[in-house]
Image (spheres, helix red, strand yellow):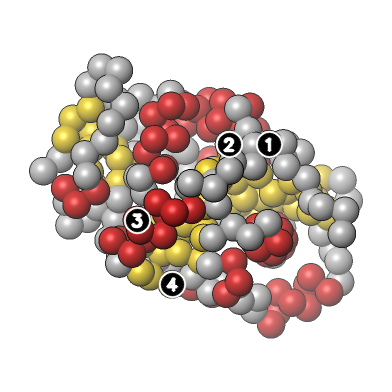
């Protein structure tokens, strides 16, 4: 049963109400309080500009446990050359706009990252909940990844690269840093060959929700983030 969200009520229906495809609710808004409430319960927005806001909680769920990160051999060679300089929370807006721009798999642009979503997640970044990892080459931003962190859970949203391996280098650096901070899980949302390549696995939604409910009880690491000196 798909629920239509109305008014200022931030509550979502139980995720078990989602359709077989994972669609749970329609409508509402992208205010920070609603977004954080959604993520805490394993729900995320995903929609196109010509649609109302759609809220999803798929079953099964793709999850990357930081300690299980796999770095493909070819990427390991790139990382050993230290080709990219990686930073955290240096230019969040540029990263999310890069993710919304033209890419080979989205020649017309990443239309699901609407201007409304860019504004909403930039606000989450300003509040310390949304974060980016940036890859730089000779002083130019060439790739990155952004997502939302609550407690010991990181919800990866999207990544982009204008140079081969740039976003992958940012991802590896971010995951390794999250492991050093003892994060419990990285939510990859939907399964794909790309996330599988880095060690992500599918788990039943009920297991994901159980892990998530414990992870979000941990103290938040509000931003801006930076790599530890070590």
Q: Earlier in the sequence, mark 2 or mark 4?
A: 2
Per the image, the residue denoted by label 4 is 201
Outermost residue toward the left in this view: 1
CA separation, marks 2 and 1?
A: 7 Å
Q: Earlier in the sequence, mark 2 or mark 3?
A: 2
Q: Nearer the viewer, mark 3 or mark 4?
A: 3
Is residue 69 toward the left or the right of residue 115 in the image? right
Viewer can see residue 171 = no
Q: Earlier in the sequence, mark 2 or mark 1?
A: 2
Mark 4 nearby-residue class (10 Å; few <14, some 14–19, many ≥20): some
Q: Nearer the viewer, mark 2 or mark 3?
A: 3
Residue plotted at (22% across, 21% down): 6
Q: Earlier in the sequence, mark 4 or mark 1?
A: 4
Per the image, the residue denoted by label 2 is 129
CA separation, marks 4 and 1?
A: 28 Å
Q: Secondary structure at mark 4?
A: strand
Residue closest to the eye, 31 or 158: 31
Whole-percent x, y for residue 43 in the image: 35, 45
């Amino acid at each position: 049963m798909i629920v239509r969200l109305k008014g200022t009520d931030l509550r979502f229906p139980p995720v078990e109400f989602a359709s077989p495809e994972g669609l749970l609710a329609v409508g509402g808004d992208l205010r920070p309080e609603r977004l954080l409430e959604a993520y805490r319960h394993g729900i995320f927005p995903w929609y196109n500009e010509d649609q109302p806001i759609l809220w999803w909680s798929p079953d099964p769920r793709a999850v990357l446990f930081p300690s299980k990160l796999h770095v493909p051999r070819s990427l390991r060679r790139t990382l050993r050359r230290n080709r990219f300089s990686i930073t955290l929370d240096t230019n969040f807006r540029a990263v999310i706009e890069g993710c919304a721009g033209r890419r080979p798999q989205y020649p017309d642009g990443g239309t699901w990252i609407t201007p409304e979503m860019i504004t909403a997640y930039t606000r989450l970044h300003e509040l310390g909940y949304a974060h980016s990892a940036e890859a730089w080459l000779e002083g130019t931003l060439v790739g990155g990844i952004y997502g939302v962190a609550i407690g010991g859970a990181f919800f990866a949203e999207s990544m982009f690269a204008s140079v081969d391996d740039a976003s992958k280098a940012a991802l590896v650096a971010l995951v390794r840093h999250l492991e050093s901070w003892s994060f419990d899980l990285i939510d990859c949302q939907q399964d794909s060959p790309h996330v599988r390549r880095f060690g992500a696995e599918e788990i039943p939604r009920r297991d994901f929700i159980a892990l998530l409910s414990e992870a979000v009880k941990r103290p938040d690491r509000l931003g801006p983030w930076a790599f530890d000196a070590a």
